[in-house]
Every structure is written in structure tokens, then in C-alpha cells.
């Protein structure tokens, strides 16, 4: 059961819920560190190792490749394992991998291969950490507080991203790209400490007995629910197409701004920080847009309308007008993505059965994030064959088209997305009921075998 205290409209969720505050801290610091690395790693490869645009895009692809390789398996594992210890391991692995990069540079041992391995390791840790935290959130926070929790998390993550981008540019100017990675390592250390302080404890999940639910069956259940539910299926396919387009241009963005727009590292950090401001605005505006337009209609506006401003991004240049046009386009994309994610995250937490949530989320992430490394490689190939600026034009032009996929979903007839659980008469319900029954059986076995394992929230 969630460990949230009784709701109080007079006190913000961050002030009245200790565990949510710690989860919020871990999420925000992790996003800050990742944002520093998203500027520092490409610039390290470009300036210290003389990497080509394709090699820079390959670094981005490597960071997201684990979602494609192990995303489905990770979801089933996360549903079986206590989330808190798993998150601690992920933070420790990420800290070690990132901290080794500046050390190797200072010892004159840094290679492009190490950067690739670092991206793969941190990407793998991210798969398990992000899946664990998304499964843990609805267990920490009651249903009526989840909208506020998602809005707060998305806003603070974007604030962390803003600090990482703008601060990353400043750190790179002062310390160099490798030195700036120390800030990311410190962010993972703070995240580790925050997760360590969580009071919430979960029952250890036993491995299925012979003849019980196995790993492949759990993966199939997650995929079956995800693609049988009309709403979830449409969001997944739209997200996959959007991520392909987003990563195609983002993977070559730093190289484009350095070699085509001729901007300095500090200016690049500040401009990307402007995107963080757009994301913060999107997180706070999401609930208001949903109330005024309806959540379904707001999603359409955010996927079909505002992304059209992305066409301003390729106009970037080292002039006041070029910088302004880029800032408007990049900020609009960030606003749209974060606001839409805030609305759909709350919907999915209320819509997907708890027994299937981890598997459904990673089935969605497998498809959504699986296109990201492909998009990164696409951007690199286009940049190598057509040039950086033509590649930017082609990739950003794809963004507004991705929202057309949502026209195939049941929400095309709705003002608002459903606020309850999945349709009891829907095709995914049998899958949900089977998974719930399996979970209850496992819980009964665990309760019978060890009474001490039943505590869900031990005080510290």
C-alpha cells in the first residue's frame, strides 16, 4: 500500500511526504547529472578525441541501446525484485563509470572506446533505475496525489536538466569536458544517498515455483496488455516515432551548433538550458491545459501543434536572430514533450493494473526507447552523407507528423482520457486478471513462509 499520509491541500506533497521527497531528490539529481553528461560527453569526444559527427551520434545510441537489448527482461525482473536495493546498485554503477572518465583523461589514458563503454554502462543502469522508480512511485503515493507527484517530478527533473545544461556549459568552459563529468558523478552520489534514506520497504518477491509464471510468460503478459489496450498502444507507437525523430536531431545537435552555427560551449549550454525552462513550464502547464481543453485534446495540441515550432531549430546561427530562433524552437519542443509526458504518465498510473505495471511500463519503454539508438544512428548517417544542416531540417520536420498516430486511438472521440482503471470488458483485462491472480498467489506463499517479510514500510 502507498505510504502517503492523508492528503492535505494546504501543504505541498514535497513537504508532507518524506519518502516522496527523497525519491524526488534522487530523480532530480540524476537528471542534472545526465544533462551535464549530455553536453560533456559529446564535447569530450569532439574536442579531446577529434570524433566525427557519426561517432558522436554513436555515443548517444550506446546510451539508449540497453533499452532495446534488455528493456523487456528488465521489466520482468523489476516486478520480481525489491526496487530500493536495485536502485542503489544502479546509482553505484553509474557513479563508478562516470568517475573513471576524468581520471582516465588526467592520466592520459582516455579513449573513444572508454566513452562508449561508459555510455553503455550508465544506459544499462538507467534502464533498471528508471523502471524501478516508476513502479515504486504509485506504491509510495496515493492515487489522488499522483497527478501532483508527476507534475512535481517532471518540473523538478526539467529544472535539474536546466541546471545541468547551463551549468554544464559553464563547467566545461572552466574545467574542460572531462572535468565537468565530475559534477555528474557527484549527482549520482547524491541520488544514492537519497534512495538509501527511503523508509518504504517492500516484500521480497519469490522466484516462481515449477509450473508457475516464468520470465518469458511475464514478458508476454506485459506486451499483450500494452498492445491490446487501444490507449496504451497508441501512446507507445506515437512515442516510438517521436523518439526516433527527436534523437535523430539531438544526436547531432552539439556537432551542429559547434561546426555549423559556430557557437561556444558556454552559449550551447545556455541555449540547451533554455529548453529546460520550456520543460519546467510544460510540467506546470500540463494540468491546467488538461483542465481547460480536456486531457485528450491537450495531448493532441502538444503532439500535433506546438512541435511545428521545431522547424526554427535549423536556423541557428552565431547572430542574435539565429540564437533567438533556435531558443524558441528548442524550448517549444521541450515544453510539448514534458507537458504531454506529464499528462500521459498520470493516466497510465491510474489505467494500468498494479500487477502489470512494471511489465507494461518496460514493454512500452522497449518500443519507445528502442527507437532512440536507431534515431541517433539515423542522425549520424544523415549528417555524414548530407551535411549537418540538411540533416537537421529533415529530422525536425518529422516531429509534428508523429502525433498523427494518435488519431488511430479511442481518444480521438474523447475530451478527456479515462480516469479509472482499464476497461473491464477490454481485451487486456484477461491478461490483467491472470497477472493479478499470479501476484496474489506469490504473496500468499511469501506470507506463509516468512511473517517478517510482510512489512511494507519500516520506519527508520
Image (tube, rainbow, N blue to C red):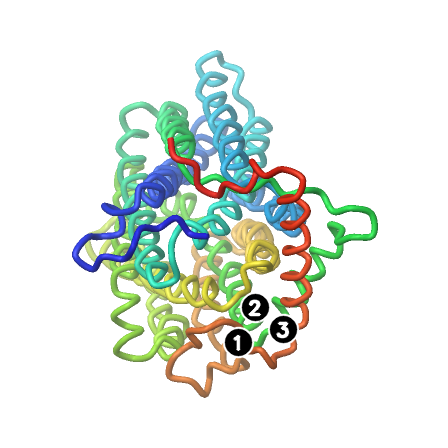
Residue corresponding to mark 2:
237
**Mark identifier at residue 429:** 3
The residue drawn where x is 74% and y is 47% is 208
Q: Residues within 10 Å of mark 2 (few under 14, many from 20)?
A: some
The residue drawn where x is 29% and y is 58% is 331
**Mark identifier at residue 456:** none
Which badge, 1 or 2, is on the more N-terminal residue?
2
Left or right of residue 106: residue 373: right
Percent x, y of residue 173:
28, 29
Percent x, y of residue 264:
29, 38
**Which of the two discs, 2 and 3, sits closer to the camera?**
3
Left or right of residue 380: residue 275: left
Residue corresponding to mark 1:
405
Which badge, 3 or 1, is on the more N-terminal residue?
1
Q: Determine whether the residue tagged by mark 1 lies in a helix, strand or loop.
A: helix
Q: Determine whether the residue tagged by mark 2 lies in a helix, strand or loop.
A: helix
Quote the CA–CA distance across marks 3 and 1. Answer: 24 Å
Quote the CA–CA distance across marks 1 and 2. Answer: 7 Å
Q: Determine whether the residue tagged by mark 3 lies in a helix, strand or loop.
A: helix
Q: Residue furthest bottom?
A: 413
User: Which part of the image, by quadrant, shows the C terminus?
Assistant: top left
Amino acid at each position: 500500500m502507498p505510504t502517503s499520509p492523508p492528503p492535505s491541500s494546504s501543504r505541498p506533497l514535497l513537504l508532507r511526504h518524506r519518502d516522496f521527497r527523497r525519491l524526488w531528490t534522487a530523480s532530480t539529481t540524476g537528471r542534472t547529472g545526465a544533462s551535464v553528461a549530455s553536453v560533456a560527453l559529446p564535447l569530450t569526444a569532439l574536442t579531446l578525441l577529434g570524433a566525427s559527427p557519426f561517432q558522436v551520434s554513436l555515443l548517444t545510441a550506446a546510451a539508449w541501446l540497453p533499452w532495446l537489448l534488455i528493456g523487456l527482461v528488465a521489466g520482468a525482473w523489476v516486478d520480481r525484485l525489491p526496487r530500493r536495493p536495485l536502485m542503489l546498485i544502479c546509482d553505484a554503477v553509474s557513479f563508478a563509470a562516470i568517475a573513471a572518465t576524468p581520471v582516465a583523461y588526467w592520466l592520459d589514458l582516455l579513449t573513444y572506446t572508454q566513452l562508449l563503454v561508459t555510455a553503455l554502462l550508465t544506459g544499462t543502469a538507467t534502464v533498471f533505475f528508471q523502471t524501478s522508480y516508476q513502479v515504486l512511485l504509485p506504491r509510495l503515493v496515493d492515487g489522488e496525489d499522483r497527478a501532483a507527484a508527476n507534475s512535481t517530478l517532471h518540473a523538478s527533473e526539467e529544472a535539474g536538466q536546466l541546471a545541468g545544461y547551463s551549468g554544464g556549459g559553464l563547467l566545461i568552459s572552466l574545467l574542460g569536458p572531462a572535468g565537468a563529468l565530475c559534477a555528474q558523478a557527484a549527482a549520482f552520489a547524491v541520488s544514492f544517498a537519497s534512495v538509501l534514506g527511503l523508509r518504504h520497504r517492500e516484500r521480497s518477491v519469490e522466484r516462481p515455483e515449477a509450473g508457475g509464471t516464468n520470465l518469458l510468460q511475464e514478458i508476454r503478459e506485459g506486451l499483450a496488455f500494452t498492445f491490446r489496450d487501444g490507449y496504451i498502444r497508441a501512446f507507445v507507437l506515437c512515442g516510438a516515432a517521436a523518439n526516433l525523430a527527436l534523437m535523430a536531431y539531438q544526436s547531432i545537435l552539439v556537432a551542429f551548433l559547434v561546426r555549423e552555427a559556430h557557437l561556444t560551449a558556454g552559449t550551447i549550454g545556455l541555449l540547451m538550458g533554455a529548453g529546460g525552462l520550456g520543460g519546467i513550464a510544460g510540467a506546470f502547464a500540463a494540468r491546467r491545459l488538461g483542465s481547460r481543453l480536456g486531457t485528450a485534446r491537450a495531448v493532441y495540441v502538444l503532439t500535433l501543434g506546438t512541435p511545428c515550432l521545431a522547424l526554427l531549430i535549423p536556423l541557428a546561427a552565431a547572430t542574435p536572430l539565429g540564437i533567438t530562433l533556435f531558443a524558441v524552437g528548442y524550448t517549444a519542443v521541450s515544453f510539448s514533450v514534458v507537458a504531454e509526458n506529464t499528462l500521459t504518465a498520470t493516466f497510465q498510473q491510474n489505467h494500468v493494473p498494479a500487477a502489470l505495471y512494471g511489465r507494461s511500463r518496460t514493454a512500452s519503454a522497449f518500443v519507445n526507447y528502442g527507437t532512440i539508438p536507431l534515431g541517433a544512428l539515423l542522425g549520424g548517417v544523415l549528417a555524414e552523407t548530407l551535411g549537418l544542416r540538411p540533416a537537421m531540417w529533415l529530422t525536425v520536420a518529422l516531429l509534428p507528423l508523429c502525433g498523427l498516430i494518435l488519431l488511430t486511438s479511442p481518444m480521438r472521440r474523447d475530451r478527456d482520457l479515462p480516469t479509472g482503471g482499464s476497461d473491464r470488458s477490454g481485451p487486456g483485462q484477461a491478461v490483467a486478471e491472470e497477472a493479478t491472480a499470479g501476484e496474489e498467489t506469490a504473496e500468499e506463499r511469501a506470507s506463509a513462509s516468512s511473517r517478517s517479510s510482510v512489512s511494507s514500510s519500516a520506519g527508520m
